[in-house]
Amino acid sequence: MNALLVYPRCPDVFWNLKHIMRFMSRKALLPPLGLLTVAAMLPDSWNLKVVDMAVTKLTDEDIGWADMVFISGMYVQGRSVREVIDRCKELGAVTVGGGPLFTVEAESFNDVDHLILGEAEITLEMFLADLAGDGPKHVYSSTEFANIKKTPPPRWDLIDVNNYVCMGVQYSRGCPFGCDFCEVTKLFGHRMRLKSASQLIAEFENLYKAGWIGSVFVVDDNFIGNKAVVKSEILPAMTEWMKQRDYPFYLNTQVSINIADDEELMSMMSQAGFEKVFIGIESTDDQSLQECSKVQNANRDMVGCVKKIQSFGLEVQGGFIVGFDSDKASVFEDMINFIQSSGILTAMVGLLAAPKGTELYNRLASENRLLETSFCEDDEYKVSFVTKMDAEDLETGYKHVLSTIYSPQLYYQRMMTMLKNYKLRKKKIRIRLIALEALCKSIWLIGICGKNRRYFWMPLLYAMFRRPQLLHVTIFASMCGFHYRKIFEELHAKN
């Protein structure tokens, strides 16, 4: 059996960091971790090929070679997913769809030959059993959640890791919280399901043996969802492995704001090699937080929490949302002021959206407030439901936030704020050729040729002469700022 595993294109968005590729010899931010894990679940006798369309083109020859084409994707990849399916149909290929987009929007893909919905550890096994028997059905689904202690490690041998800026590993699935706009608990549940420490370390070792040294994203939706196990088993094992290997990885992950309540946890994460954490902050207004059931964020000094986390050597990246029913006209300036004063460089600000199946979606549907939009809608400046605030005012205010916080002057101002508060653990930093390449190119493209070059030099010189251990952080932040400005220039041009 020849199986082709295809990861469709992602449009140019905030988080794919497309524009930093010109600073380094890389083609994409992250590999398709889900597909590589699915590949490990397929029979050993099969011939496998992975096409990540962020790295290489999907050719008719690829499709013609395959007995089956496995396709996975997220909402934002919807248009490319549809194009891949249509090409496969034209060429007579058997298609198999799975992953978040197919699971949530299964009715939109009735023309796919086989739909493997939910978690592949369960439904793919059913499909393979039928394939070896009387023949597979059209749809496979299950209400069960997988035991991820049995999940195999990804097949890194199927890709060239040097095409990517960052690698990914997964330790857990699920989240104990219940934010009404979030589909994580609908897909993976509230109960945290965990891999063992030995599993996680084995995946680290596999990456290291594949030749990887650099950034590793622990992709969990909430890495600290079970703090007791993280502190007693996972972080000690990670720290020991990292020390033995001379800290080959820069780690980042996603956590909830209650990490700020546990100094021991923050210290342990820093010692284990974590340098960045993404936190869903969403709003500075307690009423909006209560509205969306983001109770863990309410009644806090959020700027103080962010600065405390930074002081433990963890750069905070933040998610923010505008468009809640409770949002007031002041929400836009309040958000700008919070982002600037906290020193959050990567501030992912978005319009509130309601993914199908979430509590928010159900509420808006019951109120007849949902608007007709495609599942693959990627117009980031348009609301998808009837908002309490005037839609034009909301969209204008949203654009104002983005254009302000990613203006060169304000971006580099808060880079200085972050660098001064950021206390990176004291350890040897490995200097790689790719980092030197990025430094030289960023100096040339931003610091010399760039029209906003006067803002570039202050944080770079500060890091060089005052905080040299933060030089790699500063270089990457400057490249990201370049990307964000380019993305918003493109969005403004389209709108």
Image: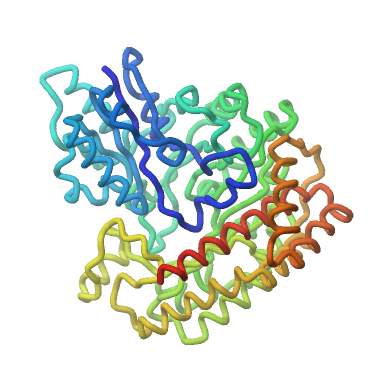
User: What residue appears at the point 51 percent right and 41 percent down from the top-left corner?
Assistant: 30
Residue 217 or 71: which is nearer the viewer?
A: 71
User: What residue appears at the point 55 percent right and 30 percent down from the top-left corner?
Assistant: 161
Residue 59 seen from this side: yes
**For the C terminus, which image quadrant?**
bottom left
Q: Is residue 378 above or below residue 394?
A: above
- Looking at the image, residue 382 sits to the left or right of residue 334; the answer is left
**For the N terminus, which image quadrant?**
top left
| Farthest residue, direction left | 134
Residue 129 at x, y = what percent? Answer: 21, 21
Residue 316 at x, y = what percent? Answer: 63, 58
Residue 292 seen from this side: no
Q: Which corner quadrant of the image does residue 431 belong to?
A: top right
User: What residue appears at the point 52 percent right and 86 percent down from the top-left corner?
Assistant: 330
Residue 426 or 348: which is nearer the viewer?
A: 348
User: What residue appears at the point 46 percent right and 28 percent down from the top-left corner?
Assistant: 154
Q: Is residue 404 above or below residue 20?
A: below
Q: How is the image coloured?
A: rainbow
| Farthest residue, direction right | 465
